[in-house]
Image (tube, rainbow, N blue to C red):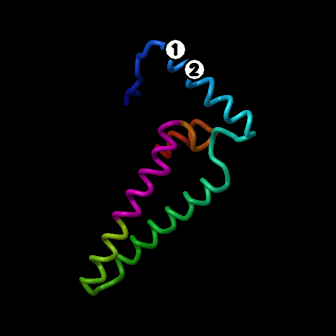
Amino acid sequence: MSKVSFNYPKSPFFTVLSERVEAYFKENKINSTGNYRLFSKAIFLFSLFVTFYVLLLTIQPGWISVILCIGFGLNFAAIGFNIMHDGAHGSFSQKKWLNEICA
């Protein structure tokens, strides 16, 4: 599978923006990749994903299954917006392979 890349000129805006973002992380002594809060959120979302899935397979009443499907869908969207988004930008982890798995 080929990787998507963008061929953009190094505009002054992009250069200044990159410098300011890098300066922000250095001034506040923050790592630009995930910390314990991000990993805790990822573990929570994946645990909730598995819980919804198992409950959907084991619960019989249809009306409960509808509620579980809604929760399952919302949880899946949360995984996409949080974990997959950070992985796609390379900010989930310092390890490239982990970012690729999350993306």
Q: Say whether residue 5 is left or right of residue 20.
A: left
Q: Is residue 82 above or below residue 74?
A: above
Mark 2 element type: helix
Disc 2: CA contacts within 10 A as few (<14), some (14-19) or many (>=20) = few
- Whether tag 1 and tag 2 are in contact, CB under 8 A, the answer is yes
Q: Which residues are magenta?
A: 73-89
Q: Residue at x 73, y 40 (%)?
A: 28
Separation of residues labelled 1 and 2 (CA atoms): 6 Å
Q: Main secondary structure of the magenta part?
A: helix
Looking at the image, residue 69 lies above or below residue 20: below
Q: Which residue is mark 1?
A: 12
Residue 57 placement (x, y as % from top left): 34, 76
Residue at 62% from the left image edge and 23% from the top image edge: 19
Q: Residue at x 69, y 40 (%)?
A: 31
Residue 69: say if magenta.
Answer: no
Left or right: 102, with 72 as reference point:
right
Report the amino acid beneath label 2: Val
Q: Which residue is mark 2?
A: 16
Q: Which amino acid lies under the numbered mark 1 shown in the image of this protein? A: Pro
Picture coordinates of residue 50, whole percent (x, y):
45, 68
> Which of these two is toward me, 67 or 96?
67
Residue 24 figure quarter: top right
Where 62 sits versus 40, above or below?
A: below
Percent from the top left, x then y, of residue 39? 61, 55
